Image: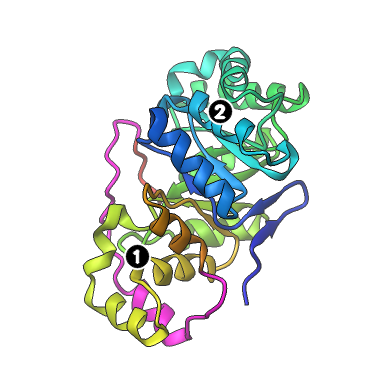
Amino acid sequence: MIPDKIITKTVTVPSVGFGTYKLTGNACIKAVDEALQIGYRHIDTAQFYNNEEEVGVAIKNSGISRGNVFITTKVFPTDFNRIIKATEESLKKLKTDYVDLLLLHWPSDDEANRIAIDGLNDALNKGYAKSIGVSNFNIEKLTMAMEHAPVVCNQVEYHPYISQEKLLTFMKSHGLFMTAYSPLAKGRVIREGILLEIAAKHNKTVSQVVLRWLLQQGNISVIPKASSLERIKENLNVFDFGLSDKDMEAISGLSGEHRITNSVWSPKWD
C-alpha cells in the first residue's frame, strides 16, 4: 500500500492535503476545522485566495499542535519583488512563525522568476519557510529554479484529463515531489463512465479512485477541496485499496490537454 506521507531529504508532507481555493469567511474556518478534526494534517492556501487569516484561525483553534500541521502558502507574481515582505504578511495572517512550504504561485518572466527564487532563498534562510518550491512551472522554468534554490515541490494541475507524465518523470529523477491541484477536475470526473466502472469494482467513489490513481504514481500529494463533511471524509479515505495496472492504464488513457484552470500566467508544460 502507498504511504500516507511523502518523505524527501528535507521535508515530510502528508500525501492527502486539504485545498482551500475559493473558501472564504466562516465557511473556510468551518471546513478547515472539520478537515483537521477528522485527520487532515496538510492545509494548502495562498495569498491570492484571500483566506490565509481564516486558515490561521481554524488551525489555531483546532487544538492541534502547530508542529503537527503542514501549511503551504504561495506568493503571487505581483509580489515577486517583495517576497520577504509578502511572506511576513502571510505569516501574520496565518498566526504562525513559519510555513512548511512556500511556493511561487505562477511563473513570470525569467528575470522576475530569478528575483523571486532569490527571495525564496532569503525566506528559507530567515526560517520563514521550512521548505520552498514553485507552482505551475514547466520543465524549463523548473530547471532554472532548481539551479538557484533547493526547491522540493512543483504544484500543478493534474487529473485524468491532463497528462503530467513527462513533468512527473523529470521531477522524480531530481528527487522532487508534485502536488496535484484540481485533482478531481472540479467535479467533472464523477460522471466519467470508465471511472464509474472502476469505482463500482472497488466499492469506492469516483473521487476516491481518482485520488488513488494520482497517489499510486508515487511522489505525488493531492489537495482536493470539499465543503461538506461527507466529501471531506471521503477524500481522506483512499489508503485501504489499490488499483491494478489495468485500472491505472485505463484512467491514464483519458488524458488529453483538457486544462480546467485558465490564467494569463498559464505556461505550456513541455
**As drawn, 29 above or below 176:** above
Measuring 44% from the left and 63% from the top, which residue is drawn there? 234
Q: Is residue 65 left or right of residue 163?
A: right
User: Where residue 242 appears, x then y in whole percent?
Assistant: 52, 80
Measuring 62% from the left and 49% from the top, which residue is drawn there? 41
SS label for mark 1: loop
- Given the image, on which type of amino acid does mark 2 rest? Val
Quadrant where the N terminus sits is bottom right
Asked whether 114 or 232 is in front, the reply is 232
Which picture quadrant has residue 71?
A: top right
- Given the image, on which type of amino acid does mark 1 rest? Pro
User: Where residue 238 appears, x then y in whole percent?
Assistant: 51, 69
Which is nearer the N-term, disc 1 or disc 2? 2
Q: Nearer the viewer, mark 1 or mark 2?
A: 2
User: Where residue 214 appears, x then y in whole percent?
Assistant: 47, 65
User: Where residue 4 appears, x then y in whole percent?
Assistant: 64, 63
Q: Kindly identify which residue carries mark 2.
A: 57
Q: Is residue 95 visible?
A: yes
Q: Residues within 10 Å of mark 1 (few under 14, many from 20)?
A: many
Q: Is residue 131 left or right of residue 190?
A: right
**As drawn, 60 above or below 93:** below
Q: Kindly identify which residue carries mark 1.
A: 160
SS label for mark 2: helix
Q: State the predominant SS element of the stretch in magenta.
A: loop
Residue 245 - label? none
